């Protein structure tokens, strides 16, 4: 970036917007914030009097990362309680914990810095973080360590059970508590059939990164599959039975 002394902004190379840093008081505290001014075509339109103004970030201080949190870095946590009809979170069905530039970040539907308070509790701070719903916690439940944040629960993706083509498995679930299976495919199949024995379940096939739904169906779906690793989500609709049988056939 280069500084424009006339407009008191930083020009961002190869971009259609500028950046300015401001000191602002809020709730008796002083914050240094970074604001974007401009109207890039590929960004959301936060319009104020015909001009795009977007809050980009807040200056923060680094804090020590406890060993318990360091041990969780690079793990992927798969969300287990996405509603069957959620139109947003199915595109971000995971959380990741990573260290970047010396700070701890949680990545998923948003990327945010988190600040550990103990071995099992952290918070998002700043103007965007309302403490009432900005906690990131780890709890023990049913023998698993689970990440809890924003009303969602997630567990280590390495614990997802595997299922193969021509398999049939019995599973249990409950409303707002989806079940995951890891499906590894070595060959291409035309019209692979995936089904459960109940009309009150929605099925989804997601890519290995858990960021794209490649097939969806209620009770069953047919999918022209490709070799790779995929994740099958069995999501109960209202009035779904507590048990189901999932089958995969050619």
Image (spheres, helix red, strand yellow):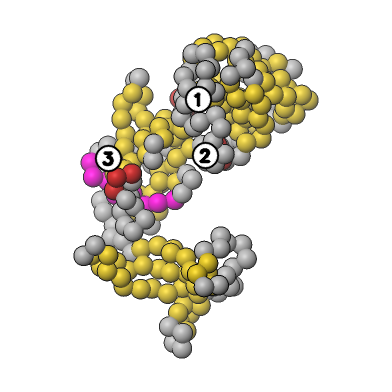
Instruction: Tell me the distance, in whole angstroms, between the alpha carbons under discs 2 and 3.
Output: 23 Å
What residue does disc 3 label? 121
Please say if 124 is above or below 120.
Answer: below
Q: Which mark is residue 89?
A: 2
N-terminal of the pair, mark 2 or mark 3, is 2
- Name the one closer to the observer, 224 or 55: 55
What residue does disc 1 label? 178
- Confirm whether the magenta stretch covers residue 112: yes
Residue 246 occupies which quadrant of the picture? top right
N-terminal of the pair, mark 1 or mark 3, is 3
Instruction: Tell me the distance, in whole angstroms, between the alpha carbons under discs 1 and 2.
Output: 13 Å
Residue found 27% across the figure and 37% down from its top: 120
Residue found 61% across the figure and 14% down from its top: 198
Report if the CB atoms under discs 2 and 3 are less than 8 Å apart.
no
Q: What stretch is highlighted in magenta?
A: 111-118
Please say if 25 is above or below 239.
Answer: below
């Amino acid at each position: 970036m280069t500084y424009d002394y006339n407009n008191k902004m930083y020009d961002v190379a190869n971009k259609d917007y500028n950046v300015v840093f401001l000191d602002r008081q809020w709730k008796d505290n002083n914050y240094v914030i970074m604001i974007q001014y401009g109207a890039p075509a590929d960004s959301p339109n936060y319009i104020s009097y015909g001009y795009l103004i977007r809050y980009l970030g807040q200056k923060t201080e680094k804090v020590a990362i406890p060993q318990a949190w360091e041990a969780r870095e690079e793990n992927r946590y798969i969300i287990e309680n996405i509603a069957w009809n959620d139109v947003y979170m199915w595109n971000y069905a995971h959380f990741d914990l990573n260290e970047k530039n010396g700070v701890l970040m949680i990545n998923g539907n948003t990327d945010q810095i988190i600040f550990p308070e103990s071995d099992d509790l952290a918070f998002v701070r700043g103007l965007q973080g309302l403490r009432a719903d900005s906690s990131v916690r780890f709890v023990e439940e049913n023998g698993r360590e689970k990440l809890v944040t924003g009303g969602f629960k997630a567990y280590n993706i390495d614990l997802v059970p595997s299922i193969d083509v021509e398999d049939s498995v019995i599973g249990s679930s409950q409303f707002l508590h989806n079940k995951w299976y890891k499906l590894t495919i070595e060959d291409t199949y035309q019209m692979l059939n995936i089904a459960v024995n109940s009309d009150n379940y929605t099925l989804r096939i997601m890519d290995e990164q858990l960021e794209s739904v490649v097939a969806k169906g209620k009770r069953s779906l047919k999918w022209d599959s490709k070799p790779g690793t995929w994740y099958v989500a069995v999501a109960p609709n209202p009035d779904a039975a507590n048990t189901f049988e999932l089958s995969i056939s050619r």
